[in-house]
Amino acid sequence: MRVAVLGAGPAGSAMAAIMSARGHAVSLWSPRGGGTRHLGSEIATRGALEGRWKIHVAADLWRAAELSELILIALPEPALLPILQRLAGALIGAPDILFAPAGGLAPALLHQLMAARGIAPRIGALPAPPILARRDADGVIAITALRPRLWLGALPMPAAPGLAVLAEALFGLPVELLADVLAAGLAEPGALIEAARLFAPAGQAHGLGRLLLALAAERDAVCLALGRGGLPGIATLVTEQGGLADPPRPLIETGLGLTFLDAMARASHTPAPLLTGALNLLEAAMGERFGPHPVLAALDQPTLAGIMSPH
């Protein structure tokens, strides 16, 4: 399969390597060029996947997308809005699209942008990538953990089984289906993990784990209020990725993730004092506000109402 990976951070690069190792033709694009500047025609990996894997570095977004059968979006949340707007204008035809991670309701926004052009691609969202990875000082991608399975939500919902088959072919992992892309966005664990790391008392045995479970309990209450029960538990998501990511995510990514969860709590009239408090503390510490969430603000009301309605 011809696959374009948008985003050349450690996770995007590691997924590109895994797909190349499985025989797929992979193009890799970096919005600023930093993730591909050191690459020739290969990605070197160590850890759970050892070797050097053939890839093509795309010079621009259009060249990455033009001949692809599937586009994998592996971008940090702060970068999603402008790149999705560019991608919607660059796409020719309707390749399948996967988000990894889900990026809140970014899949719904891309669907809205494509629908304005009369294009209706199948769009899937993974709450978490299949790997835990970092870029070492020598430029090699260290894949520190490979998940035993994936979860996937889709838009439109009937596309989920077909996209699950594609995801399994890409990564060689079994896929469990979620209700939709909202469920995938709610299940994304990154903001919860980083909030617990930031605010758990230093030196308190098991404090991080207790705070993470408490934050996740509020998130789960929001999910139930929105009719999206049955998400993978936070403990499962963390243990199956081999523990916490190293290094931690940038604070702006955590802030936007908390902003999304806080918006979902307000929309569902669900009290979430820990989630809201973590967001308020982070905004106070950084001296800036993260809301309104840029993707939510860009969604039109019919699209947002359709996604938010219980299934």
Image: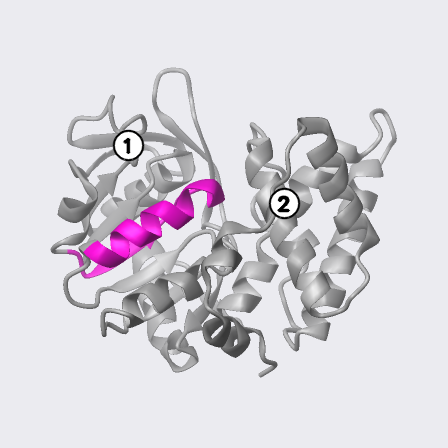
Camera sees residue 212: yes
Residue 85 in the magenta stretch? The answer is: yes
Where residue 308 appears, as percent x and y from the top left, is 57, 74
- Residue located at (51% from left, 57% from top): 297
Q: Where does label 1 land, which residue? A: 51
Q: Residue furthest top?
A: 137
Q: From the image, which quarter does the N terminus lie in?
A: bottom left
Q: Residue furthest right?
A: 204
Q: Amino acid at mark 1?
A: Gly
Where residue 194 appears, as percent x and y from the top left, is 66, 38
Closest to the observer, 229 or 76:
76
Q: How many marks?
A: 2
Q: From the image, which quarter does the C terminus lie in?
A: bottom right
Residue 272 in the magenta stretch? The answer is: no
Q: Amino acid at mark 2?
A: Ala
Please tell me whether residue 92 is drawn above or below residue 198 in the rendered image: below
Where residue 220 appears, as percent x and y from the top left, is 72, 64
Q: Which residues are magenta?
A: 68-89
Q: Is residue 138 left or right of residue 283?
A: left
Camera sees residue 238: no
- Residue located at (61% from left, 81% from top): 310
Please tell me whether residue 81 is drawn above or below residue 196 in the rendered image: below
- Residue located at (28% from left, 47% from top): 5
Query: Reading the chain from its start, which is encountered first: label 2 or label 1?
Result: 1
Q: Where does label 2 land, which residue? A: 191
Dot 1 falls on a residue whose secondary structure is strand
Please tell me whether residue 218 is drawn above or below residue 254 in the rendered image: below
Q: Residues within 10 Å of mark 1 (few under 14, many from 20)?
A: few
Q: Residues within 10 Å of mark 2 (few under 14, many from 20)?
A: many
Q: Quadrant of residue 270?
A: bottom right
- Residue located at (22% from left, 53% from top): 3
Closest to the observer, 221 or 84:
84
